[in-house]
Amino acid sequence: MRLRLLVCDLSVVLLLAISLFTFQADPAVAKDLPSDICSLLGAQQLQKTLGQPFGAPSKSSALPAYSGQAAGTNCGYSSEKGVPTDVTLIVYVDRSPTEAKQTFDKLSAFYPATSKPVGIGDSAYIDHNHAIHVLKGKVRYFISVSSNAADAVKEKQAQDLAALVAEQI
């Protein structure tokens, strides 16, 4: 009887060990967000992408899209020299990827897509104001570049910054 229980216990332990290795979360898919959401876009990344120095971001709360959802984080960056340029990063972390996708899809009706770049997050689109909206897992974010540059240039800059953020999520 003891031998049968021991064999049964060993098989349960072996099954659990195999399932841990089989169903392990992919670290490339599920990264922990930094405690300071605004650090997703650093001054060096902004300078490299936009070609001018930026100071530390101003940080504030962003209202939730719908009642019952968590507030987001609004990060505002301003150039320190050169052409006056402002970058806005707004990040929302929803309870699940399903909730994030549903909200992302609903909001796209209010900010219609003019184009849909591929390879950034799970889904992304550029709106009529040349800002980018991105969904990655349970994270939704928005990036807008305000400057006197041509619209196509601002869109490209926003896409490049969005790709940098997506790599960290």
Image (cartoon, helix red, strand yellow):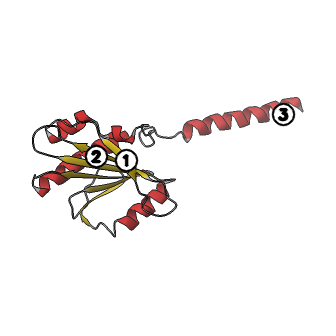
Residue drawn 13% across and 56% down?
152
In front: 123, or 18?
123
Q: Nearer the viewer, mark 2 or mark 3?
A: 2
* SS at circle 1: strand
* SS at circle 3: helix
Identity of the amino acid at label 3? Answer: Arg
Nearer-N-terminus badge (2/1): 1
In front: 86, or 94?
86
Residue beneath label 2, please?
76
Residue 58 in percent (x, y) is at 31, 42
Identity of the amino acid at label 1? Answer: Ser
Q: Nearer the viewer, mark 1 or mark 3?
A: 1
| Apparent side of residue 16 relative to residue 27 in the rendered image (left or right) | right
Nearer-N-terminus badge (1/3): 3
Residue beneath label 1, please?
60
Residue 56 in percent (x, y) is at 28, 36
Give the Cα separation between the discs numbered 1 and 3: 62 Å
Q: Relative to 29, is 141 above or below?
A: below
Numbered label attached to residue 4: 3
Residue 165 in percent (x, y) is at 32, 43
Instruction: Please tell me how many numbered marks the rendered image carries.
Output: 3
Question: Is the residue under label 3 in contact with that under label 2 (CB below 8 Å)?
Answer: no
Question: Is the residue under label 1 in contact with that under label 2 (CB below 8 Å)?
Answer: yes
Identity of the amino acid at label 2? Answer: Gly
* SS at circle 2: strand
